[in-house]
Image (tube, rainbow, N blue to C red):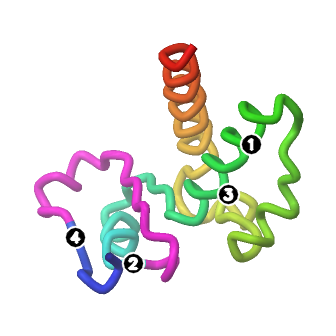
């Protein structure tokens, strides 16, 4: 949980890996602050929650997800829609979305 103030060992962040934080409240956790300090690309939990939800909706309902409604439900605009001053979130979102799509398709194929 966010209250745990989880951080990574500094040696891991020196290579500037992609940091994925699943905690969505609060948006700025100790892990995100650490990623920013090292200049590592990151994705905050609310953004991951939103993008995964959108992909799942589209796979299940075979139609576009109501992004604006879903953004509002998550708590407003995801970080990727704010100014891009905070690292490289858009490319990371594309990677995350591709991963979710691939995993969801595998699960659907397994259940058929």
Give x and y (percent) for residue 14: 20, 53
Residue ID for mark 2: 29
Q: Nearer the viewer, mark 1 or mark 2?
A: 1
- Checking the image for residue 68, the label placed there is none
Q: Nearer the viewer, mark 4 or mark 1?
A: 1
Foreground residue among 29 and 67: 67
Q: Earlier in the sequence, mark 4 or mark 1?
A: 4
Task: Compute the Cα span from label 3 to label 2.
Answer: 17 Å
Whether the magenta-drawn stretch holds residue 13 is answered as yes
Up-down: is 20 above or below 27?
above
Question: Of marks 3 and 2, which one's residue comes earlier in the chain?
Answer: 2
Using a 10 Å C-alpha cutoff, classify the residue at mark 3 as few (fewer than 14 neighbours), some (14 to 19) or many (20 or more). some
**Tag shown at residue 80:** 3
Q: Earlier in the sequence, mark 1 or mark 3?
A: 1
Q: Earlier in the sequence, mark 1 or mark 2?
A: 2
Q: CA distance from mark 1 to mark 2?
A: 28 Å
Q: CA distance from mark 4 to mark 2?
A: 9 Å
Q: Is residue 100 left or right of residue 59?
A: left
Kindly report the distance in space between the C-alpha atoms of the residues bearing marks 4 and 3. 23 Å
| Quarter of the figure with the N terminus | bottom left
Q: Does the magenta stretch mainly form a helix, a strand or a loop?
A: loop
Q: Pointer 2: residues within 10 angstroms few (<14), some, or many (20+)?
A: many
Quadrant where the C terminus sits is top right
Q: Residue at x 53, y 39 (%)?
A: 96
Q: What label sits on residue 7 in the rendered view?
A: 4
Q: Which mark is residue 57?
A: 1
Q: How far across and down, in percent of the image, does residue 100 sit?
A: 55, 34
Residue under the image location 49 percent in, 27 percent down: 103
In magenta segment, residue 97: no
């Amino acid at each position: 949980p966010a209250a745990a103030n989880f951080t990574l060992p500094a040696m891991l962040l020196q290579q500037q890996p992609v940091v994925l934080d699943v905690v969505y409240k609060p948006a700025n956790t100790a892990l995100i602050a650490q990623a920013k300090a090292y200049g590592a690309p990151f994705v905050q939990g609310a953004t991951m929650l939103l993008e995964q939800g959108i992909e799942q909706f589209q796979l299940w309902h075979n139609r576009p997800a109501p992004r604006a409604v879903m953004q509002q439900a998550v708590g407003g605009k995801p970080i990727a829609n704010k100014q891009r001053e905070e690292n490289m979130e858009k490319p990371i979102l594309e990677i995350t979305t591709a991963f979710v799509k691939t995993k969801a398709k595998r699960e659907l194929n397994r259940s058929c």
